[in-house]
Image: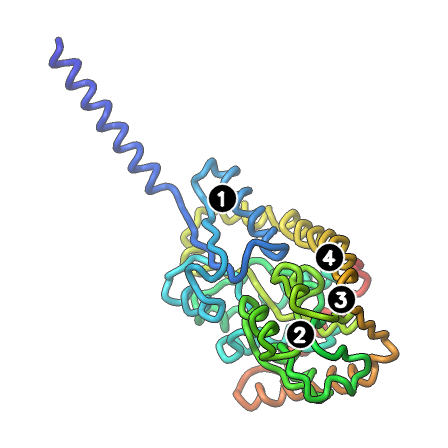
């Protein structure tokens, strides 16, 4: 009798071990690389991680790795390619040669006025076949746009009150936004966001462009600055929450549906956190920094030089490389035109 009880206990224990092993095999954990700390741009992915964990009872989870702890900002695409990570925040302007078509969205002064419009344009562009194929070379799939507000500047030294004041100023401005600043005599440099505070503090450059206003506060640039701009609205550096194409293909259909169903709340959160950041940050900046306001009238000479001429330069350079650059720009402009009236 005792022996029977021992055997039954052993069988039960073995069954529990098998069940645990099956549970472990069924559980999917994705490692997500994020440059920089937790901040407004990461709020949507933090929501998504919690949402998926709750909806799947812990069977599908994201492990969020901040501050380049598993992949440098410039190496996220390469890490996806070798399947070292399952996803990450990709700033395409950090490595312009790897996914050059994606930089069509980085062009300055595109006619995209709101975050609602940016959402529509970015999602449409990521679904365009040449762009999908470009990212697929790195085993990447852009599932969500990382919406960003338009870029402004914050800096030390003399505040640029007029366009001529930018002449000779060394500024952190990536890709086509840097090309825009060249048209007024500035000297652009490309520096990943986590390195900007130190560069500005040490005088490596005198000003830095970032999404306004959240990113300046997130990276504490106001601590080492004397002024900030309002009204330049350069454009954005296109970012996408990009996932491993091979890992995504293996997901159960139900999990893919959950990721799609989460989109409305994902984007609602993105827009809401930026609004709240402005309410909090702008008064904070005004306490210690000089606000330099550019009106549409004072900015027009800059836009005339830094808008379409920079677009044309980008098209010519990339067309020479055999890329469908004109088609890419036309796609973006057509998608932008379709967003007219989106107000958020």
Give yes or no for contact between labels 4 and 1 (Cβ–Cβ under 8 Å): no
Local packing at callout 4 (Cα closer than 10 Å; few below 14, some 14-19, many 20+) is some
Q: CA distance from mark 3 to mark 1?
A: 50 Å
Classify mark 2: helix, strand or loop.
helix
Q: Is residue 183 left or right of residue 294?
A: left
Q: Is residue 2 left or right of residue 233?
A: left
- Residue nearest the viewer, comparing 323 with 179: 179
Q: Residue at x 80, y 59 (%)?
A: 343
Q: CA distance from mark 4 to mark 3?
A: 11 Å
Q: Position of residue 60 (x, y in %)?
A: 45, 44
Q: Residue at x 69, y 74 (%)?
A: 156
Of marks 3 and 2, the one in the foreground: 3
**Earlier residue among tags 3 and 2:** 3
Q: Position of residue 219 (x, y in %)?
A: 61, 62
Give yes or no for contact between labels 3 and 2 (Cβ–Cβ under 8 Å): no
Q: Is residue 109 left or right of residue 123?
A: right
Q: Residue at x 14, y 14 (%)?
A: 4
Classify mark 4: helix, strand or loop.
helix
Q: Which residue is mark 4?
A: 281
Of the numbered discs in the image, which one, if any, rests on residue 331?
Answer: 2
Q: Quadrant of residue 271?
A: bottom right
**Earlier residue among tags 4 and 1:** 1
Classify mark 3: helix, strand or loop.
loop
Q: CA distance from mark 2 to mark 4?
A: 35 Å
Q: Is residue 335 visible?
A: no
- Residue nearest the viewer, comparing 36 with 248: 36
User: Is 4 rendered above or below residue 149?
Assistant: above
Local packing at callout 2 (Cα closer than 10 Å; few below 14, some 14-19, many 20+) is some
Of marks 4 and 1, the one in the foreground: 4
Q: Which residue is mark 1?
A: 254
Give yes or no for contact between labels 4 and 3 (Cβ–Cβ under 8 Å): no
């Amino acid at each position: 009798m005792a022996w029977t009880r021992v055997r039954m206990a052993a069988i039960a224990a073995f069954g529990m071990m098998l069940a645990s092993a099956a549970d472990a095999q069924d559980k999917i954990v994705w490692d997500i690389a994020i440059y920089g700390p937790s901040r407004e741009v990461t709020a949507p992915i933090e929501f998504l991680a919690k949402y998926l964990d709750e909806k799947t009872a812990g069977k599908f989870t994201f492990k969020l790795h901040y501050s380049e702890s598993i992949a440098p900002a410039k190496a996220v695409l390469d890490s996806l390619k070798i399947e070292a990570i399952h996803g990450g925040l990709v700033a395409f302007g950090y490595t312009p040669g790897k996914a050059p078509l994606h930089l069509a969205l980085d062009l300055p002064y595109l006619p995209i006025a709101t975050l609602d419009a940016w959402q529509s344009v970015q999602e449409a562009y990521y679904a365009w076949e040449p762009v999908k194929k470009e990212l697929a070379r790195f085993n990447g799939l852009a599932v969500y746009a990382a919406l960003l507000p338009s870029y402004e500047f914050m800096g030390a030294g003399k505040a640029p009150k007029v366009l001529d004041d930018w002449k000779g100023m060394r500024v952190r401005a990536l890709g086509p936004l840097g090309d825009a600043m060249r048209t007024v005599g500035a000297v652009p440099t490309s520096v990943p966001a986590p390195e900007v505070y130190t560069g500005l503090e040490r005088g490596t450059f005198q000003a830095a462009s970032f999404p306004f206003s959240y990113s300046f506060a997130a990276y504490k640039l106001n601590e080492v600055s004397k002024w900030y701009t309002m009204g330049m609205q350069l454009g954005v550096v296109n970012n996408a929450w990009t996932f491993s194409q091979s890992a995504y293909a293996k997901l159960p259909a139900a999990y893919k549906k959950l990721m799609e169903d989460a989109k409305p709340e994902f984007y609602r959160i993105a827009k809401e956190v930026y609004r709240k950041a402005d309410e909090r940050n702008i008064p904070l900046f005004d306490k210690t920094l000089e606000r330099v306001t550019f009106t549409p009238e004072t900015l027009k000479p800059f836009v005339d030089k830094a808008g379409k001429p920079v677009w044309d330069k980008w098209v010519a350079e990339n067309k020479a490389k055999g890329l469908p650059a004109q088609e890419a720009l036309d796609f973006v402009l057509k998608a932008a035109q379709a967003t007219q009236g989106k107000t958020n």
